[in-house]
Image: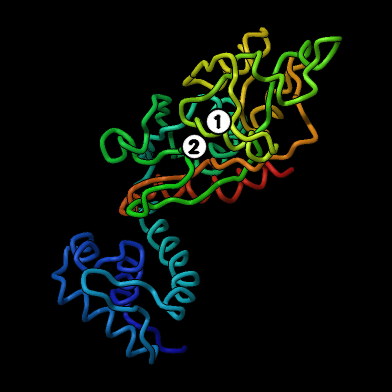
Amino acid sequence: MRRLPPLGAIEAFVQVARLGSVKAAAEELALSAPALSRRVQSLERFIGRPLFARRHQAMALNEDGERLLVRIAPLLDQLSDSVEEMTAGTELLRLRLGVLPLFAAQRLFPHLGDLRRRHPELHLDIDTAGHGIARLGDGLDAVIALARDIDPALYAKRFDTNSVYLIGSRALAEGPRALTRPEQLAGHTALLHREMPDTISAWGQAAGFGAIKPMAVDYFDAGGLMLEAAAQGLGIAFMHASHFNHANDPRLVRLFPDIEVESPYSHWFVCRPRAMLSRPVRLFHDWMFGTLATLERT
């Protein structure tokens, strides 16, 4: 059998790669920083090449390190999970997840049965209150956030990209007073989500109309209520294509369907870097970007 490097050296390498810091990795593994550095260096000597670009207070993976991490980290996680399962018995795992109500209702909950079948030990505490990213580590383990970009100090992975749709009641697309020109939006109320205030300007720029000045702007913190307000004729919702498609509400129509506008916002999975070392966070993360992403494409 081919000789392998010490497991401790592999573990040290993965922790430094994930946390980006020898000090943070040393604290996680209950080692001194010099001891952890020696383990990483022993792995580099074993492989015969450096794995990190060393900086003053951080260590960034180089190309060889990136390749090794992709191949070796999942195997180390599987080993850790197998040992944990053997020693944990039937102990439940719990994830405190922040998620917006509309994403939860339209895209998450329809598939949670699959998550339960795959990982019956994993249970979710769902939090739909706002400002989830600010509460990471203080009540929340991870968040599915709707944002333009994420603080680089956090672990973040983009889940989707989307288009901005103008969504209104069917009456707005039919009859003698139907909306046929963007200029007519000046006579209507715009409905905006507080997490997505730039959708109106993004749509206006892409439509070649510039700044849209509606009669009024009403703000919501729940996408489901925005869709209902639009269906009731209370205004025109500037929302994502996925919101409209998943709603499948015959009372609603997409206005100006010939105008395609890329949204500046995406859904992201976000947590603190150390949270990715937690089995509940890792299980959900891998299911979300594996199974859930696949189910949404089918």
Q: Position of residue 34 (x, y in %)?
A: 15, 76
Vertical side of 129 occupied by 293: above or below: below
Q: In this figure, which colouring scheme has been used for the structure?
A: rainbow
Task: Please report the residue visible at 21 percent of the width from the left and 74 percent of the height from the top.
Answer: 56
Answer yes or no: is residue 228 visible.
Answer: no
Q: Position of residue 257 (x, y in %)?
A: 78, 31
Task: Please report the residue visible at 43 percent of the width from the left and 25 percent of the height from the top.
Answer: 128
Label 2 neighbourhood size at 10 Å, few (<14), some (14-19), many (20+)? Answer: some
Determine which residue is flagged by label 1.
Answer: 103
Amino acid type indicated by mark 1: Phe
Sequence order check: which comes first, mark 2 or mark 1? Answer: 1
Residue closer to the observer: 14 or 102: 102
Task: Please report the residue visible at 37 percent of the width from the left and 80 percent of the height from the top.
Answer: 51
Answer yes or no: is residue 191 visible.
Answer: yes
Which of the labelled discs sits on residue 146, or is there none?
2
Q: Position of residue 160 (x, y in %)?
A: 59, 45
Q: Quadrant of residue 242?
A: top right
Q: Are marks 2 and 1 in contact (CB under 8 Å)?
A: yes
Q: Quadrant of residue 262?
A: top right
Label 1 neighbourhood size at 10 Å, few (<14), some (14-19), many (20+)? Answer: many
Task: Tell me the distance, in whole angstroms, between the alpha carbons under discs 2 and 1.
Answer: 9 Å
Q: Position of residue 294 (x, y in %)?
A: 66, 47
Q: Indicate left or right for 159 with 129 as reference.
A: right
Residue closer to the observer: 121 or 25: 25
Task: Please report the residue visible at 39 percent of the width from the left and 41 percent of the height from the top.
Answer: 142
Determine the residue located farthest toward the right in the rendered image: 175
In the structure shown, which secondary structural element does the residue marked by tag 2 occupy?
strand
Q: Indicate left or right for 151 with 101 as reference.
A: left
Amino acid type indicated by mark 2: Leu
Q: Quadrant of residue 73?
A: bottom left
Residue closer to the observer: 61 or 125: 61
In the structure shown, which secondary structural element does the residue marked by tag 1 occupy?
helix
